[in-house]
Image (spheres, rainbow, N blue to C red):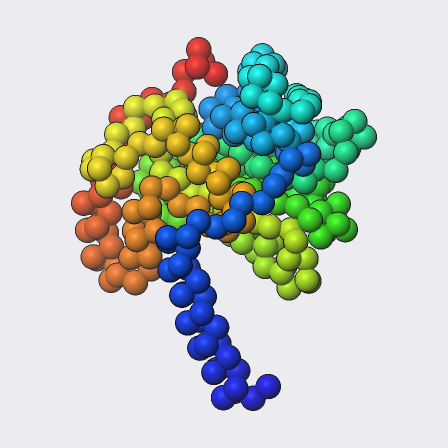
Amino acid sequence: MNFFLETIQVTLLSIWYNVESFIHLFVPMKKKSIAGEVVLITGAGSGIGRLMAQEFAALGTVLVLWDINQEGMKETARLAKHSGASRVHYYLCDCSDKNEVYRVADQVKREVGDVGILVNNAGIVTGKKFMDAPDSLIEKTMEVNTMAHFWTYKAFLPAMIANNHGHLVSIASSAGLIGVNGLADYCASKFAAVGFAESVGLELLATGKSGVKTTIVCPYFINTGMFDGCQTKWPRLLPILTPEYVAKKIIHAVLTDQVHLLLPKSIYLIAALKNILPMKQGIMLGQYLGAFNLMDTFRGRSRKQE
């Protein structure tokens, strides 16, 4: 195809895709059925992981829960069964340990079957300035927030590719799109998680495996205890999100095969402006939005909450 014809094709398709997107502002996207699917959620012992488990359970899925907190998983399993899950399995697994991920993944495949929906949700935050963060905590942040995604993909993606069916869900962060003062290691891990998920998603499309979907979730701070103490400067523009709201939005995104989910909606605009504004104006906007002081009052999750 020559340059002229291909340009015309891209132009016409671009117009159509924008019209289609506009229509879906008024006509809801059709939701797919996931009844009977095996859904694996990492970090399922509390917070968003627990709430997603309950939401998925209500849709008739088979749940596989991973966490390092045995008691937390037991409670999530109880709630999931009450919510309607057909079956619930839970396993102790430290997602930062590659060998443990592979070992437990093999156990899941033997005892439950192939995973159809993989939700990489486990995450940690140090909450320290870069020069104050111990090397061990920086390494742990990268291992849990980023490298764990590599190992779970390696473990469960082959079956999805073979069947050309599945869904990869990455719970990242708005801090994976925009740098935040006081979150250097966390931002680095989430930027990497976003880039990894996008790249693998493109690999799948390029190899004709369009049946394996990708959803990348980038929320602002969520009131789960992980970022306790953090305050937002403009709550109406950038509210601290409730975990129940976020969990419901994630499930909706999965059911409609939405690739990028940014919460709240103002993040779409802020992320776009970051890439087009002059540097000085971007820094000024960051100061205006409070990005320089978000972590000033950070306390983090207490041991009791954990």
- Most foreground residue, 284 or 239: 239
Up the image or down, 72 lies above or below 111; here it is: above
Residue 160 placed where, x, y %?
A: 71, 47
- Residue sticking out furthest to the right: 110
Residue 181 placed where, x, y %?
A: 31, 40
Q: Is residue 251 visible?
A: yes
Up the image or down, 207 lies above or below 33; here it is: below
- Most foreground residue, 267 or 19: 19
- Residue sticking out furthest to the front: 27
Q: Which residue shows up at 68% across the image and 40% down it?
A: 116
Up the image or down, 83 lies above or below 101; here it is: above
- Residue 87 located left or right of residue 26: right
Q: Which residue shows up at 68% across the image and 62% down it?
A: 208
- Residue 267 located left or right of residue 42: left
Residue 172 placed where, x, y %?
A: 47, 41
Q: Quadrant of residue 69?
A: top right
Q: Is residue 95 visible?
A: no
Residue 191 placed where, x, y %?
A: 46, 47
Q: Quadrant of the N terminus?
A: bottom right
Q: Which residue shows up at 44% across the image and 46% down it?
A: 261
Q: Quadrant of residue 70?
A: top right
- Residue 276 located left or right of residue 281: right
Q: Which residue shows up at 64% across the image and 35% down it?
A: 35
Tell how many labels: 0
